[in-house]
Amino acid sequence: MKIKNYSKLMLNEHPLNAYSAEINVLHNKDIIFPHEETHEMNYIDYEIIKNSVIVLGVEFDSSDKELIVKDQLFILDGHHRFEFIVDNSINESLDVVLVDLFGVKIESYNSKLLIEEELFSEKIKSEKNFLQKNNSEFYISINNVKYFSDNISDIKELYSYKKRLLKDLVISPIKNNENTNETIINFTPISAWDFGRDIIFPYKSTWITPRFDV
């Protein structure tokens, strides 16, 4: 995919390739892929679409005289906006940020604990055998204390369990940059290598920096 209207962004705290650009999102919807589910409760409208940017993780083929990216763009921020654009057939060029998919920092989106910590520890132990014994790459942390499970076979299974905990109101998302005294629950972070055309993680799985909130 060739990008005509673009300008390089200078990110002092994050030395990676990033560009501000304009593309017709609707025309390119077949090569733009979400990595998270959306939530039915959202407040997206056309004004929000026009006054914000969708952040897309890409692999750059060239960034010299012209900007060329591989035809596989992953939404890093803007899943609900993308859904609104497609559902409402907004056929116009819109502002996006194109950023190196393998250069961004991907963390697990924080969750706050909604039940007592002791009950939670017992729950994840009884259901998935999460223990402080480091016997797996997959963990759940409680205020940065990690509990590992060799019953979890891959990152998708771990985040399916997170989805279940969210649905059962055991945990609830909370922004990673929010100061809080809540007990914070976290999970093994998803990697950019885990992204795929047919792989969708639960709502609020990732916290990605740099951020381009406006």
Image: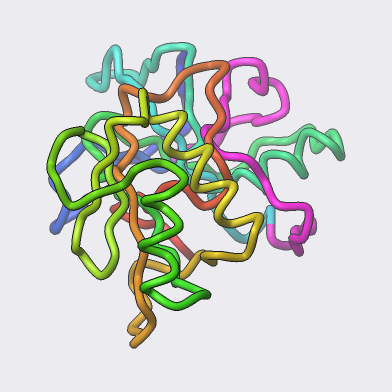
Q: Residue at x 20, y 64 (%)?
A: 144
Which of the 4 image quarters holds residue 188?
Answer: top left
Q: Residue furthest bottom?
A: 181
Which of the 4 image quarters holds residue 165?
Answer: bottom right
List x then y, in percent, for residue 164.
Answer: 59, 48
List x then y, in percent, for residue 35.
Answer: 52, 33
Task: Report whether 145 appears left or right of 109.
Answer: left
The total number of labels drawn is 0
Is 178 located above or below residue 82 in the figure? below
Q: Magenta segment: does it hold 29? A: yes
Which of the 4 image quarters holds residue 211?
Answer: bottom left
Q: Residue furthest right?
A: 88
List x then y, in percent, for residue 145.
Answer: 19, 62
Q: Which residues are magenta?
A: 21-48
Camera-nearest residue between 13 and 37: 37
Q: Magenta segment: does it hold 7? A: no
Q: Residue at x 24, y 44 (%)?
A: 148
Q: Residue at x 67, y 23 (%)?
A: 29
Task: Report whether 105 appears left or right of 128.
Answer: left
Camera-nearest residue between 2 and 159: 159
List x then y, in percent, for residue 65.
Answer: 27, 19
Task: Report whether 5 appears left or right of 99.
Answer: right
